[in-house]
Image (spheres, coloured by chain):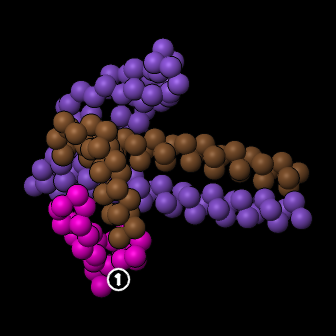
Chain colours: A purple, B brown
Amino acid sequence: MSEQHKIHTVVDIYGNTYKMVGTETSGHMRLVASMVDSRMREINALNPSLDQAKLAVLTASNAIHDYLKLKEQVEQLENEIKKLKE
Amino acid sequence: MSEQHKIHTVVDIYGNTYKMVGTETSGHMRLVASMVDSRMREINALNPSLDQAKLAVLTASNAIHDYLKLKEQVEQLENEIKKLKE
């Protein structure tokens, strides 16, 4: 992919600025950033003593957990489609 | 949920120890931890100047991005099932 096709988006997450570069739209990247920011604030409210690095690690863990659960759902749906097509 | 049904798992992510508490099996939590750890190491290899908090925030963003993409896939599969059942 050439540099000219990359989309640059500046987002703010938990008080820090990040320059995101990729193929996703700025709208998508801003949605991602706002979800990470909200989750960090939620986890901070529950564990106010955590430093920012640990807070972000727990946010990442939380997101990976949701990803794995959704992956199970995709597998179930794919199996259902397979059966419906038989 | 009573405290006795909660599962406690100690995991190591990027050199720090975290005590995870929840309803998921220890195996699931260790998988989550190892995925977060691997992604942090991958992102660090690409951006060695990032501090650990920013590295974890980018890891969380990466995971939320994957989650949203999978969510689109779930919606597509659900639509496909709906059509197959018509």
Task: Look at the image and tell me whether residue B85 can be seen.
Answer: yes
Farthest-out residue, left:
A49
- On the image, the x and y values in percent for residue B41 come to 29, 51
Residue segment shown in magenta: B1-29
Residue identifier under label 1: B5
Q: Secondary structure at mark 1?
A: helix
Label total for image: 1
Q: In this orientation, which residue lies closer to the viewer: B53 or B21?
A: B53
The verdict on residue A20 being magenta is no
- On the image, the x and y values in percent for residue A46 come to 21, 56
Residue located 67% across and 64% down the image = A76
Farthest-out residue, top:
A4
- On the image, the x and y values in percent for residue A75 come to 65, 62
- On the image, the x and y values in percent for residue A21 come to 39, 26
Residue located 71% across and 51% down the image = B78
Q: Chain of mark 1?
A: B
Q: Residues within 10 Å of mark 1 (few under 14, many from 20)?
A: few
Residue B19 lies in quadrant = bottom left
In-image side of B5 versus A22 (left or right): left
The verdict on residue B16 being magenta is yes
Residue located 30% across and 85% down the image = B4
In-image side of B55 versus A66 (left or right): left
Q: Is residue A41 above or below residue A83?
A: above
Residue located 38% across and 22% down the image = A9
Residue B7 lies in quadrant = bottom left
